Image (cartoon, grey):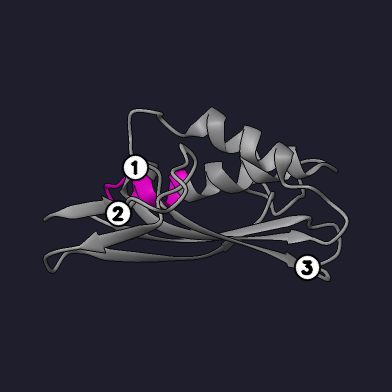
Amino acid sequence: MAVRHVNPEGLHRSPAFSQAVVVEQPAKTIYIGGQNGVDADGEIVGPTVGEQALQAFRNLATILESEGATLADIVHWRIAVVDGHTFDEGVAAFRQVWNRADPPPAITVHVVAGLAPGFLVEIDAVAVV
């Protein structure tokens, strides 16, 4: 399977995201529903975006591992952050879980009016294996 991360000249190049990701051949695709900062018991792990984002990334990794994949197989994720909260802590959490040697996925970030009570961030993803 061929996956290409596209960052054409004339567009901003960031170490945190790719402008696009192209999957060249048919492959196993994993669509992961929105993950929040909750543990295995469904309890919110903390009151900050950073704590919740780190747990959401861990949840993504757990789902991927159950399918023989890793975070490096993610080609796109969509992040929702509750209005009034910065995602800077979420970026720090991303840096904790992402291997800098792997090209980053395409990313979309939305500021939303709210999520379920107590939730500050939600991350869904598409992975290709």
The residue where tag 1 is placed is 72
**Residue 64 magenta-highlighted:** yes
Q: Mark 3 and mark 2 in contact (Cβ < 8 Å)?
A: no
Q: Which of the two marks, 2 or 1, is nearer to us in this view?
A: 2
Q: Could you say which quadrant of the image residue 123 lies in?
A: bottom right
The residue at 40%/44% (across/down) is 104
Span of residues in magenta? 61-70
Distance of label 2 from label 3 (alpha carbons): 32 Å
Q: Nearer the viewer, residue 118 or 120?
A: 120
Q: Position of residue 1 (x, y in %)?
A: 11, 56
Kind of element beneath mark 1: helix
Q: How many marks?
A: 3
**Residue 82 magenta-highlighted:** no
Kind of element beneath mark 3: loop
Dot 1 or dot 3: first in sequence order is: 1
Left or right position of 87 against 66? right
The residue where tag 3 is placed is 115
Q: Could you say which quadrant of the image residue 46 lies in?
A: top right
Q: Is residue 70 visible?
A: no
Q: Nearer the viewer, residue 78 or 31?
A: 78
Bin the neighbour count of mark 3 within 10 Å (Cα to Cα): few under 14, some 14-19, many 20 and up: some
- Provide the major secondary structure of the magenta segment: helix
The residue type indicated by label 3 comes to Leu
